[in-house]
Amino acid sequence: MANEQEIQKKYVEYQTIEQHISKLQEQLSVINQQIENIVTLAATLQELSKAKSGAKTYSQIGPGVFVQTELKENKNVLVNVGADVVVVKTIEETKTDVEKQLSELKGVVANVTNEIEKFTLYYQNLQQEIKGMIEKKE
């Protein structure tokens, strides 16, 4: 017969797993948003590579704030590589980097999704175990 202390211990574990699943789902949401941003960037780079010098465009200078600009050159872009270091890269180099980032993020999505599935199964089994313990107690 299960005692109250064993049930409480399982319930605490149950709650911990529930919180962990929730955090993993939040991480997955953030990663999916990053993927959307990278896909948008890839499309923008593709359009930029097709644009002609002198073309008028709008450039974002902040969240939701744009300024009209004239494209002087469409072969190179400035890329922030971290620690406020910016390097000049060709559009093609940048597209390759973006594709690599996208591939890596898709791998992370697969890993996080796998973890969610694993913990969800454990969570469901734990739920059934607690239910069984309570029924035996009664």
Image (cartoon, rainbow, N blue to C red):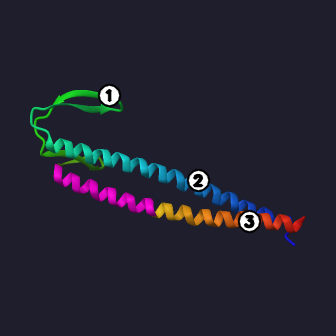
Q: Which residues are magenta?
A: 91-110
Q: Measure the alpha-carbon separation of dots 1 and 2.
A: 34 Å
Please indicate whether residue 105 sits to the left or right of residue 81 in the image: right
| For discs 3 and 2, the disc positioned in front in the rendered view | 3
Please say whether residue 6 is visible from this viewpoint.
no
| Residue position for label 1 | 65
Label 3 with label 2: CB-CB less than 8 Å: no
Q: Measure the alpha-carbon separation of dots 1 and 3.
A: 53 Å
Q: Residue at x 29, y 59 (%)?
A: 100
Please indicate whether residue 55 sits to the left or right of residue 63 in the image: left
Viewer-proximal residue among 116 and 67: 116
The N terminus is located in which quarter? Answer: bottom right
Q: Residue at x 28, y 45 (%)?
A: 41
The C terminus is located in which quarter? Answer: bottom right
SS at badge 1:
strand
- Image location of residue 83, percent across then percent down: 30, 49
| For discs 1 and 3, the disc positioned in front in the rendered view | 3
| Residue position for label 3 | 128
- Image location of residue 128, percent across then percent down: 73, 65
Tell me: residue 52, above or below residue 85: above
Whichever of callouts 1 and 3 sits on the residue coming sooner in the sequence is: 1
Query: In the current view of this chain or complex, which residue is farthest to the bottom?
Result: 1
The amino acid at mark 1 is Val
The amino acid at mark 2 is Ser
